[in-house]
Amino acid sequence: MRGAGVLLGTLFLAACAARPVAVTDPPAGAGATVYVVARGWHTDIGLDAALLDRRWDALRARFPGATMFVVGFGERAYLQKPNHTPLDALAALLPNDGLLLVTALVAPPEAAFSDDEVIPVAVSPAGFAAVASYVRASMRNGPDGAPEPVGGGPYPGSAFYAATPTYSALFTCNTWTADGLRTGGVPIETAAMFFSSQVTGQLDWRTAR
């Protein structure tokens, strides 16, 4: 991923071409897009901030000017550690608290994550709303009803939030992404999602078909 220059607070106008992926059939002229960002073994979900409802107001207030929120799920201890050992990776396979990393963008995801794989997935407006609700429901609310912050993220324009799902070998970051897409009407298998390629490969296969 490029540096802080493409994250919140910095105007970045460069755009990179990404292949369009239409795995559902939204009504003509009334479609929406959900983005899947594959970063190595990990996948995130990207959502257009302008299409999100009032339940996202706390994030808008924290990241004013954000045009997109990219959200990824992971194991809480592992996700917060800057350096990992093989033992950390093994420990993360056990059922543990989950954590969400939210990255606020002012650039298109194809520009912000140009070194990674960005797949735009066409969905219906109802499908977009369902995916957005799934992602928001994955955020644990604090006493004020807003997402419960855990700490600052690893780079400017990012933050950690408490998650409602439990992370384990049977429910990984890629399971979470696949479940979210399926909630939005994307015909994707969700079982045993261990690698990002299992998610992106299904999107590629359905597009080719």
Image (spheres, rainbow, N blue to C red):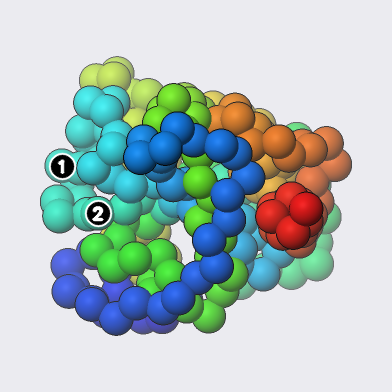
Q: Residue at x 53, y 61 (%)?
A: 20
The outermost residue toward the front is: 28
Q: Position of residue 89 (x, y in %)?
A: 77, 59
Instruction: Describe residue 74's horizontal placement relative to residue 47 as left or right.
Output: right
Where residue 104 sits, quadrant-wise, is bottom left
- Identified by mark 2, the residue type is Thr
- Identified by mark 1, the residue type is Ala
Please say if 120 is above or below 56: below
Please say if 145 is above or below 113: above
CA gap, disc 2 and disc 1: 12 Å
Q: Which mark is residue 61?
A: 1
Q: Which residue is drawn at 34% across and 77% down?
A: 15
Residue 27 visible here = yes
Please say if 72 is above or below 58: below
Q: Which of 151 and 48 is in front in this view?
A: 48
Q: Where is residue 66 in the image (x, y as percent from the top left)?
A: 22, 54
Q: Which residue is drawn at 51% across and 46% down?
A: 122
Q: Do callouts 2 and 1 mark residues in contact (Cβ within 8 Å)?
A: no
Depth check, mark 2 against mark 1: the one in front is 2
Q: Which residue is drawn at 37% across and 24% down?
A: 141
Circle 1: element type: helix
Q: Badge 2, how many Cα within 10 Å: few under 14, some, many 20+?
A: some
Q: Name the residue under label 2.
A: 67
Instruction: Describe residue 195's horizontal placement relative to residue 39 as left or right.
Output: right
